[in-house]
Amino acid sequence: MTSRRRLTLDGNEAAASVAYRASETIAIYPITPSSPMAEVCDEWASRKRTNLWNAIPEMAEMQSEAGAAGAVHGALQAGALSTTFTASQGLLLMIPNMYKIAGELTPFVMHVAARTLATHALSIFGDHSDVMACRQTGFALLCSNSVQEAHDMAAVAHAATLETRIPFLHFFDGFRTSHEVAKIEELSDDDLRSMIPESSVFAHRQRGLTPDRPVLRGTAQNPDVFFQAREAQNRFYDVCPDVVARTMQSFGALTGRRYGLFEYVGDPAADRVIVIMGSGAETVHETVDYMTARGEKVGVLKVRLYRPFARQAFLAALPKTVRTLAILDRTKEPGAPGDPLYLDVTTSLAEAHAEGVSPFAVQPRLVAGRYGLSSKEFTPAMIKAIFDNIAKDKPKHHFTVGIVDDVTHLSLPWDPSFQTESEDVSASLFYGLGADGTVGANKNSIKIAGQETELFAQGYFVYDSKKSGAITVSHLRTSKRPIRSAYLVNRASFVACHQFEFIDKIDVLEHAAPGAAFLLNAPGAADEVWDQLPKEMQEQIVERKLRFFAIDAYDLAKSAGMGSRINTIMQTCFFSISGLLPRDEAIKQIKKSIEKSYGKRGPEVVRRNCEVVDQALAHLHEIKVPASATSRRVRPPLVSTEAPDFVQKVTAVILAGKGDLLPVSAFPIDGTWPMATTKWEKRNIALEIPVWDSKICIQCNQCALVCPHAAIRAKVYDESELSGAPPTFKSTPFKGTEHKGKHLTIQVAPEDCTGCNLCVTVCPAKDRTNPKHKAIDMHPQAPLREAERANYDFFLAVPELDRTTLTKFDHKSSQFLEPLFEYSGACAGCGETPYLKMLTQLFGDRLLMANATGCSSIYGGNLPTTPYTTNSDGRGPAWSNSLFEDNAEFGFGFRLALDAHVASARRLVQQLGPQIGDGLTTALLDADQSSEAGIKEQRERVLALRQKLAGVKVDEARRLETFADYLVKKSVWLIGGDGWAYDIGYGGLDHVLANRRDVNILVMDTEVYSNTGGQASKATPLGASAKFASSGKAAGKKDLGLLANMYGHVYVARVAFGAKMVQTAQAFIEAESYPGPSLIIAYSHCIAHGYDMAQGAAQQKLAVDSGVWPLYRFDPRRIPLGEPPLQLDYGAPKAKVGDYMRNESRFRMVERADPARYKMFVEESQAAAERRYAVYQQLAGIKVPAFEPVTQPAAPDSKEK
Amino acid sequence: MDLSTTCFGKRLPHPLVVGAGPLGDDLDTVKALEDAGAAMLVLRSLYEEEITGEQMDAFFHVEAHSDAFSEASSFEAESEMPLGPDEYLEHLRRVKRAVGIPVIASLNGCTAGGWISYAKLLEDAGADGLELHLYHAASDMTTSAADVERQALDTLREVKRAVKMPVAVKMVPLLTAFANFAKQLDTAGADALVLFTRFHRADIDIEELEIVRSLPLSDSSELPLRLRGAAILAGRVKASLVITGGIHTGIDVIKATMAGAHVTQMVSALLRHGPDHLRTVRREIEAWMQEHEWTSLNEMRGNMSLERIPDPAAYERANFRMALR
């Protein structure tokens, strides 16, 4: 037997490692939480790692999971070994091909990081709802419960599929297994070769389509034969479980790790058994070990091969003594007699009993239970509750566990104090910020523990859903024995809090065990730290006799030129306090991991990190803990007491990290949530905030326009409003003619600003005598917080500008309108959100938004708080996210509904004309709503209509009341990123454009799949490196705008707010007013481009100046005026494309790796920019004959005026 | 006719060397320069601040988004290529493979750590010599001239200890005690002294209230300052003397040689006229020497140095007295 490496890695990599080596072709598409499997394969391919047959697998990123499934189907048909990776909605998109692949008896393995399907809400987290939606496809379903198993079962699947000809779906729990880092034994190439016989590979290849031995597959069959042909493959399913069992046996002989189709663990004479699959089975295993050691007759049956379900093997695996079975499903099938695993077990037992082959003298009781939806915690305490439940005479049937169901009362109560972790487990918890590198360092720590000690090691990382100021919690365990705890650390012997402000926000010591060590990164002198703690925390420290350590890591990092990167400092302290390794050895290993992690960033980065590691311990202090709490300060409430009831009772609980405690009754029943909740979450994440100097300000409003978080705002108002202003509130007379006599204030929202600096970099107003001082400068937030909070509250209370008084709508005046999108969780400096904010300023009170899944749906709609808000009339954007792929169609449906509602309203107005009165009827039907004033008047007419209708006692009047508001113009916007518009949703988008309905499409083009981590899309430009195109994309960016132009009836604009704000605003206003389909493609700088987002606007300008990003507007309304429909808003390229490219890490990476290739990309991109300009310039000169319709257009007939 | 000279311990067929600048960036140009007869090539400066700055920027801006969000542990493609000198080193290796003439690397640093480690890496990558750009922003009011000189000398000594290849120091013209400092560099082991660095121009945009930096191409008018520097040092230091800045014609080279230069570097002239200009300049030198019956440059070298001219004040008091005469 070859000696095998011990590796510390996550479940995704463990599975991918086998899949890659066992495949010749791999088709991929990113989706959380499976993307890392595809990414790591792509990385291996780019490093020319070979598979088992010394070839580099052919990799292809497709436009969707449906595309990936089609591609693997084709590759399989052509005789190649193939694999793919997916999850959730992606898996659903593969189902049609899965039927085909199985129906054609094709050996194939797909690896799935099982994830929740979107229902009332999207969830990226883990459960089995996606996998369970595939159990009818004919695929074998094979489940792994841990990182090691994800590796091992991958091998079993790749071997068994070739022998059985049944395709396999190998799955493991999304996040809990896919993202858990653990120490495993790696299967060598020789291991895999011995598992996968060459003869079965040849047989597969031999069945491949080739004109040298042509066959026909994919026929259409009629009623006479289809049925029989479908039954022709039954034998293959009959023998499949035996083959899998045999494969597992030979695997066991090879590696010593023995698996079965069903594995029983527990008392051989157990009377209570839990049947379960997935990571939860490991926690049950741990709990069973604990309980049987204490004399309880319990056990667990782990289901490994779920399909084909081997009844005999299942029955044989159960102890004959079992009296009650709890069958646990990690999915929900509403309306079914039970969830799927329960039904299969029930059927098996019933059939066995009916056939007289049941091994049980007394038929066991079956109790169904549901747990763990969307990665809900599943702990030993809950498992104990299940065993207790099924010990009862009348157990709760169809129970749930892990939640409190106070509505249908299905849930089991559990005792959280029940713990099963053995004493030799050492558990640690770390609270950090995404940006401070805590998770990265902890991943390294767990790898050090795994690789440099004999201990088993486990790391699991929890993130909140913000993209700026995100809180991370790292859960680390080490143990002499294998770790089966697939749940969060809830008894830690070490707790670190890497951010001082968390002490007022989160109960970081909640899970600190008595006598644990607590490490706090605290500013200032160590002897002053104690006094700064809130009373609750002091009490916890005293009562639990915690050892308390403090370090001013930020001070050390700053002095060492490390900015706010404190992770390696804190890591050094962790090793020192925990004693996991001898101190010198720990420091040596930390430095080794620094070299490995940051070596690619360069030697200076490594040097500075190593330097702080050497200095860290000198700054670490153990704090003497007094005998009792001394602080009088208690934690402030998380949200203002002025917040609405729902926010206080639900949102605030989620914000405190206690969302698990909320009962079912707290929640909306259909996924409908209140608006405007970000405003209550004062995150205070900016270290510095902008300060306005009214004396220098030229009142251009650019700062407000570019602010991604609506945290800097402009307002004009009457001077009289200033009475009662706080003493530091700033105001200045407005300089323009439009609001003559009014006053202006530019005000920062001090607690909502993310400190991105974008406003400062765009501010054009300098102090002439001291040019480094601008009208907007950054100053430390803490000293300003109180005063600016009062100023901001005052500012918000100043009445908004009457929209109807604006004589023109442009980039500047738009900023005097109230944004109805505020304080989102988007990245600091986000390049997308300024567009959305402007959209809500211009049309927010009559906006319907369909949002494709992606960054914008996450910062737009991810709990706990959401940014879309309402104006003082209660109007605001109605927002919804359906899916990723269907957004154009989804939004189009909004339009259909509106058109139907408008038509009904108009018909009823006409019908009730006599009762309503001629004047009002005509005014309602002929209203000109092309201006704000027109819309306001129509709203007043609708009000008058309602008053009239109140007195009309006919059914039509009641019906018209439900439609009346639709007489006021609404604006439908379909928004999303380039992944949606260029790739997965292009078919739908194209169809919507081809139709003539009045919808507006906003594509926020970041040129990659931003939300899933920067994978290449068809919008990725030539030469940019992105995931799945690491050596630089070899093809140019798809010209989506030009394709849309070709329809002729579509309004199309390409905009970049950082380059030309006035044109951006023009495009939004024109698109909205155009009574047909409109498409705006908006340049959106993104963190995935790899530079300081404060420079985002400047880089946009360079993109336009170099011709990389053309600005234009194609307006079909110009055709009848005899003008060319296309109008260019940019000039001949005057800057070099190479200068644009060099600023961004995505291009620089290519230069570093292959300067000749980079040079070629620069030259080709330069030529493309010039060619593009030449083409557009010519198009902009084309006038086309106007079409004068003789008759009125037939459809759609319900256009609003 | 003997145009040969010695610099960096190397015998060169003539003194025409391509100076540090963009000419060395492109392999095709480098080959063309060799074909046109360049005796030696100095690559563009590797700036320590640039390297560390870019490294740290990438570290801060990219790492801040790593392991920070559940859907993506990073936002960029995995690259094994580190930022830092590797790119420069790889280019140096490519240039070395492409041409047979000596290739000198050039390093502009500011910290002891940076100088030493990068110098060694450059030597390992095959550099035939190293040109150190010692530059200190003279705006710090707390740093004395002696401090600046001490730091520079320490750096030179450390670099010399770390590498075996010859090391030149590129000097700035604005020094309180130029000759004394040059002598100290000479004593500390400088193999050549390069006269002088050309500064970027910092102009003021009076509308935008911004500084506009530029580095226009030189012309022969910049030569006299360098001639004076070489003339002061010629014969008084062991180090070879190199003139850079203002060498455009054969006559410029003759003047430089008379002032004492062993080697003359050209950048602007080659950027303006292309690599072939090397041939022109060489022809001009030969024609002039033939006409004036010089047979070797060695014979002429330093004949107009401070030591050998009858009125050293012509250099020492500079143009002030000359103008009054």
Image (cartoon, coloured by chain):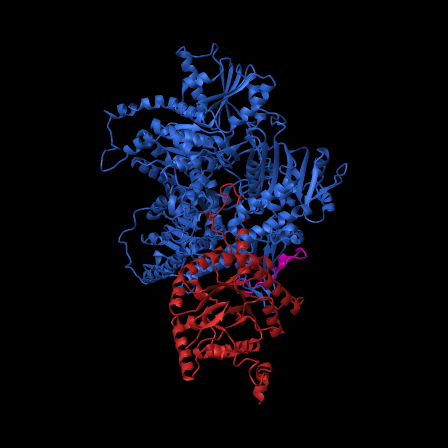
Chain colours: A blue, B red
Q: From where the camera sits, is residue A17 visible?
A: yes
Q: How many marks?
A: 0
Residue A717 part of the magenta-drawn span = yes
The reply, left or right, for residue A514 in relation to residue B201 is: right
Which residue is at a point 22% across and 37% down the rendered structure image?
A212
Give x and y (percent) for residue A1058: 48, 58
Is residue A1037 placed above or below A294 in the rendered structure? below
The magenta segment: A714-743
Nearer to us in this view, B196 or A437: B196
The reply, left or right, for residue A545 in relation to residue A659 is: right
Residue A1033 part of the magenta-drawn span = no
Q: From where the camera sits, is residue A870 visible?
A: no
Give x and y (percent) for residue B53: 55, 57
Q: Dividing the image into 4 quarters, which one contains the N terminus of chain A?
A: top left
Q: Provide the major secondary structure of the magenta segment.
A: loop
Quarter of image, res A83: top left
Is residue B150 placed above or below A1048 in the rendered structure? below
Give x and y (percent) for residue A839: 47, 51
Nearer to us in this view, B229 or B268: B229
Residue at the right extreme?
A: A627
The reply, left or right, for residue A474 in relation to residue A161 is: right
Give x and y (percent) for residue A464: 55, 41
Is residue B130 placed above or below A198 in the rendered structure? below
Nearer to us in this view, A192 or A495: A192
Nearer to us in this view, A792 or A605: A605
